[in-house]
Every structure is written in C-alpha cells, then in structure tokens.
Amino acid sequence: MSSVLMSLILLRITIALYSIGLLHSFLTIITRKKTLFRVALFGICSGFLSHAWSILYTWRETHLPVSNLHEALSFFAFVIVLAFLLSYARYRLESLSVFIFPLVFILTLAANLISSPQQPLPEILKSIWFYIHIPSTFLGYGAFFVTFAASVMYLIQENELKRKRPQAFYYRLPSLEICDELGYRSLSIGFPLLTIGIVAGALWANKAWETYWGWDPKIIWTFITWLIYAVLIHYRLSAGLRGRRAAFMAIVGFFFVLFTFIGTRYLGTAHPYIQR
C-alpha cells in the first residue's frame, strides 16, 4: 500500500472520529450531560492518535507532511487539536471544544478533498530549516487559535453578563477571568513559536537565496501578523490591556493568520505548500 493511500485512509478515519467529538461536544453544551463529553473526548483523543499515525507514517515513508496544501491543511488541524488537548488538560473546559472543532473538521475535510501530489520532495525543502521553520509556525498558529477561541468565549460571556436575565449559554461557559487567562497563556506560547518560525525562515532564505528577506506576499503578511500579536503582548504587559479590547485584538490577529495561511495563495506567493 502506498504511503499516500495509507495516509488518506487514516485521515478519513480521523475525520470520522473528530465528527464524533464535534457532535458530542455540542450535545454536551446543549444538554449539560457530562457523560456525553466522555464520548466527545474519546472521539477527539482517538482522532488525534489516528491523525498522529497518519503524519508519522508519511514522515517515515517519505517526508514531514507539510510540503503541499493537502498536507498543510491536515497538519494545521493536527496542531490545533494538540493545542486543545493541552488546554483541556490544564483547564478542563468542555465548552472550548465547541469553538475549536468546527475549524478542525473543516480543515481535515478540505485536506481529504484536495489531492496530494505524488512527486519527490523539492530539493529546497531538504533542509534542517524546513523542520524548524514550518512546524514552529504551525504550532504558533495552533496556539493562536486557542487564543481566538478563548477571546470569542470572553465576548459571549461578557454579553451574557450584561443581560438582566442571562441565557442558558451563560452557564456553559467559563468565567471571564478563565477566558482571559487562557487567551493570554496561549498567546504567550504562540508568539515565541511564530517568532522562531520567522527567524528560521529568514535563515533558511539566506542559505537558499542569500537574502534574509524577500517581498513575497506570504512573508509580508506573516510579518504583519507577527506585529499584531507583538503589539497585543506589548500592551498587555506595559499597559495592562485586558478584557474586551484584548479579545477583539486577538480575534483580528487570527483572521490575519487565516489570510496569511490561505489568502496569500491568491497573491502569487512562492511558498510551495500554498501553490499546490
């Protein structure tokens, strides 16, 4: 069995398991039955293991699967699930899964629908910087999505608190303090990871093309995204920026992440996994 076919089979198993997790996460929020989240967690964890197997199998047989759009979508979903599981281990927030897994499902489904080119890894990607630049960047993006989800929960919860009679959703979400703390902690992890990814990318570019900076749309938008999060961290630390304004800024930041990841492919980027 070819590595591409095996990886595709594992990805489809992963999608089915994530679907179970997503469905039962929503049912948990609707019914407030903890037993349903056990099923959700089973689906999520089983899907994560299947997903990890798919990635490790491809890596062992050919290369780290982040070299084209099919692989990048799948890997992005994988690091988001990893970020969720780490967050859940610390905070035990069932409601977080409702905000995380719709995107995970969309990414894995899109990866399943996009064919993976069966061709050798380009020579330029056979570099140690490939294994630092891309995974670090994706791990940073995964952490930023947790920041995004925590910020959305914060705004919803704040809106519920302003009501004279909060709706049922109010009782399903964590406190404003927990939302803010989760958002900041994930931001504090994501920012250095993205920074490492950018620095590694610059060093890789210098080795390949003898320049640290190129006017590639993806490079420019990655730097803009980095600046947004840098400003957010700066104002949180220096001016005590918290709450609603910090949440809005974090949400805007993640939309820049999505544009950098997907939107720049329409601007003529030279990055290979966006072109295919």
Image (cartoon, rainbow, N blue to C red):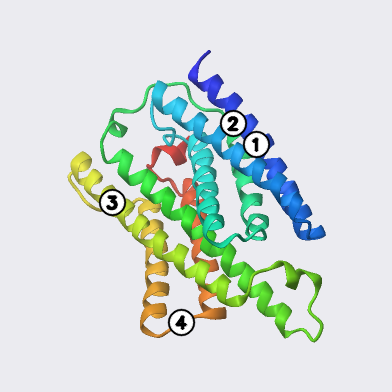
Residue 264, relative to residue 166: is it above or below?
above
Q: Which mark is residue 241?
A: 4
In space, the residues marked 2 and 3 are separated at their CA atoms by 35 Å
In space, the residues marked 2 and 1 are separated at their CA atoms by 6 Å
As helix, strand or loop, the secondary structure at mark 2 comes to helix
Q: What residue type is labelled 1?
A: Ile
Q: Residue at x 38, y 44 (%)?
A: 135
Residue 167, relative to residue 15: is it above or below?
below
- Residues tagged 4 and 1 counted as in contact (Cβ below 8 A): no
Residue bearing the label numbered 2? 11
In this rendering, position of residue 214 left or right of residue 76: left
Looking at this rendering, what residue extends furthest in the front direction?
Answer: 35
Task: Give the label, 2 or 3, closer to the camera.
Answer: 2
Is 29 or 66 nearer to us in this picture? 29
As helix, strand or loop, the secondary structure at mark 1 comes to helix
Q: Which amino acid does label 3 sit on?
A: Gly
Q: Which amino acid does label 4 sit on?
A: Leu
- Residues tagged 2 and 1 counted as in contact (Cβ below 8 A): yes
Q: Residue at x 59, y 62 (%)?
A: 149
Is 252 or 96 nearer to us in this picture? 96
In space, the residues marked 3 and 1 are separated at their CA atoms by 37 Å
Residue bearing the label numbered 3? 214
Q: In which quarter of the image is residue 275?
A: top left
Residue bearing the label numbered 1? 15
Q: Residue 244 carries which label?
A: none
Q: Quadrant of residue 63?
A: top left
In space, the residues marked 4 and 2 are separated at their CA atoms by 41 Å
